[in-house]
Structure formats: C-alpha cells, structure tokens
Image: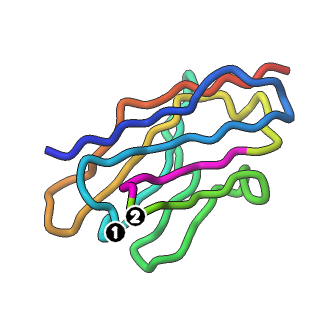
Amino acid sequence: QVQLVESGGGLVQAGGSLRLSCAASRPIFNAKPMGWYRQAPGKQREMVAVFTSGDTTNYADSVKGRFTISRDNAKNTVYLQMNSLKPEDTAVYYCNARWWFLSGDYWGQGTQVTVSS
C-alpha cells in the first residue's frame, strides 16, 4: 500500500507564500502523473499543478505564474511553492500519484490552506 503524506499547509495573509510537501512511501521517479489538487468548501476537487504522463507540467489557469510544482526523486517528495496567495486559494490541498504497475490512484489525506484577506 502506497502512502502519500502532505504537509506545509496553514494560515497565511493574502500576498503571502507557503510551500507544500508530499512525501511518498515508495519511489516517485516513475509516478506519472503526479501532482496537486484542491477542494474548496462546496466545490468540486480541481487540478492545481501536475507532472503529466508526458513529463511536462500542467497548471490551472488560476495559479499560473504564482505556483510552481517541483520534485526531488531522491527524497520521494513533490513540492508546491505557492506565492502571491489569494483568499480564493483557500482549500484543502491533496497530493495524487499513479504508478503504471499499481492499480488505481493514490491520494494523501490533505492539508488545509487558508488565506485571509
């Protein structure tokens, strides 16, 4: 069973920054796709930033230029650097990963990000 553990969430003022981490219990060099999703109260879960199956990155339009996804394969960890945060970025942020030789998607437990105005 694969575990994904997110950390780094918290309360920040608008304009501030946070860095989220997602640590996996198995190597991530072959995890494709892998990335970050978020779910705000009363809304559907949405993609924020991912490493695609084609080894590129994809960002939601709402975060382009403000968020950056990165990975450290040696640490089995994916990061999400969030700058210029806005109140509308408030949500629970989830890490997601898939390995071609394992069945299904894997999700972390989520980390709360709250941006105050």
Mark positioned earlier in the residue sequence (1 or 2): 1
Q: Which mark is residue 73?
A: 2
Look at label 1 and name its amino acid: Phe
Q: Residue furthest bottom?
A: 54
Q: Is residue 55 above or below residue 13?
A: below
**Which secondary structure lies at badge 1?**
loop
The CA span between labels 1 and 2 is 6 Å
| Spot occupied by residue 68 in the image (x, y as percentages of width and height) | 66, 57
Look at label 2 and name its amino acid: Asn
Task: Give the quarter of the figure containing the N terminus.
Answer: top left
Q: Is residue 22 above or below residue 61?
A: above
Magenta segment range? 75-82
Q: Residue shown at 21%/69% (left/top)?
A: 100
Q: Residues within 10 Å of mark 1 (few under 14, many from 20)?
A: some
**Which secondary structure lies at badge 2?**
helix
Instruction: Choose between 70 and 117: the one closer to the eye.
Output: 70
| Spot occupied by residue 54 in the image (x, y as percentages of width and height) | 43, 80
Residue 116 as seen in the image, left or right of residue 104: right
Q: Residues within 10 Å of mark 2 (few under 14, many from 20)?
A: some
**The image quarter in which residue 26 lies:** bottom left
Q: Residue shown at 50%/43% (left/top)?
A: 21
Per the picture, the main secondary structure of the magenta-coloured stretch is: strand
| Spot occupied by residue 81 in the image (x, y as percentages of width and height) | 66, 48
Q: Which mark is residue 29?
A: 1
